[in-house]
């Protein structure tokens, strides 16, 4: 092997490493697509559930207020229902905050490690 071939080999190695990094990124993106689709479907179903439950809750609250109005003045029945809603809203808000703080597992396992290994290899072999 002649000294004249070394620059060509270095260029080829750099091109191969760049191609490897692009392929690693594409692989990671392809592995994330099904997970993101599942998360998207879950969000859509959650929104549908929220709409249906909200409508059902409105009817239940109206029925509860009407029932309480039989034994309490109307203003007191509505105040009791509002207090219950405040308690329920606070509890649901806390649960939502806890769920949003939880880390999502959308990044495939090993993708970050493979990229770190590639970068380490480039650093070791480019000097």
Image (cartoon, rainbow, N blue to C red):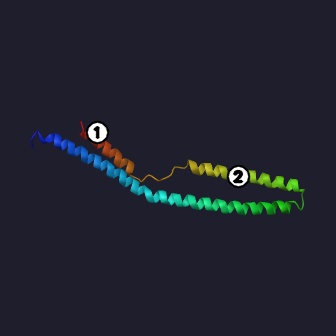
> Residue at coordinates 17% horizontally, 43% vertically from top-left?
8
> Residue at coordinates 61% horizontally, 48% vertically from top-left?
97
Q: Which residue is at the front of the view, 114 or 32?
A: 32
Q: Dot 1 corresponds to which residue? A: 123
Q: Of callouts 2 and 1, which one flags the residue occurring earlier in the amino acid sequence?
A: 2
Q: Position of residue 16 (x, y in %)?
A: 25, 48
Question: Which mark, by number, is residue 67?
Answer: none
Quadrant including the C terminus: top left
Quadrant including the N terminus: top left
Q: Helix, strand or loop at disc 2?
A: helix
Q: Residues within 10 Å of mark 1 (few under 14, many from 20)?
A: few
Q: Residues within 10 Å of mark 2 (few under 14, many from 20)?
A: few
Q: Position of residue 2 (x, y in %)?
A: 9, 41
Marks 2,1: beta carbons within 8 A: no
> Residue at coordinates 78% horizontally, 60% vertically from top-left?
61
Instruction: Report the side of 120 relative to 85 (left or right).
Output: left
Identify whether 25 is placed above or below 10: below
Instruction: Report the side of 63 relative to 14 (left or right).
Output: right
Q: Position of residue 3 (x, y in %)?
A: 11, 39
Q: Position of residue 82 (x, y in %)?
A: 79, 53
> Residue extending furthest left?
2
Q: Dot 2 corresponds to which residue? A: 89
């Amino acid at each position: 092997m002649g000294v004249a071939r070394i620059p060509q080999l270095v260029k080829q190695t750099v091109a191969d490493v760049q191609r490897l990094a692009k392929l690693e990124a594409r692989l990671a993106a392809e592995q994330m697509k099904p997970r993101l689709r599942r998360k998207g479907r879950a969000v859509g179903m959650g929104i549908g559930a929220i709409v249906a439950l909200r409508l059902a809750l409105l009817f239940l609250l109206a029925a509860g207020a009407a029932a309480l109005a039989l034994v309490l003045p109307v203003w007191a029945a509505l105040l009791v229902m509002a207090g219950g809603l405040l308690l329920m809203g606070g509890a649901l808000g806390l649960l939502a905050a806890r769920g949003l703080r939880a880390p999502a597992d959308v990044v495939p396992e090993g993708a970050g490690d493979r990229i770190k290994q590639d970068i380490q290899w480039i650093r070791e072999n480019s000097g």
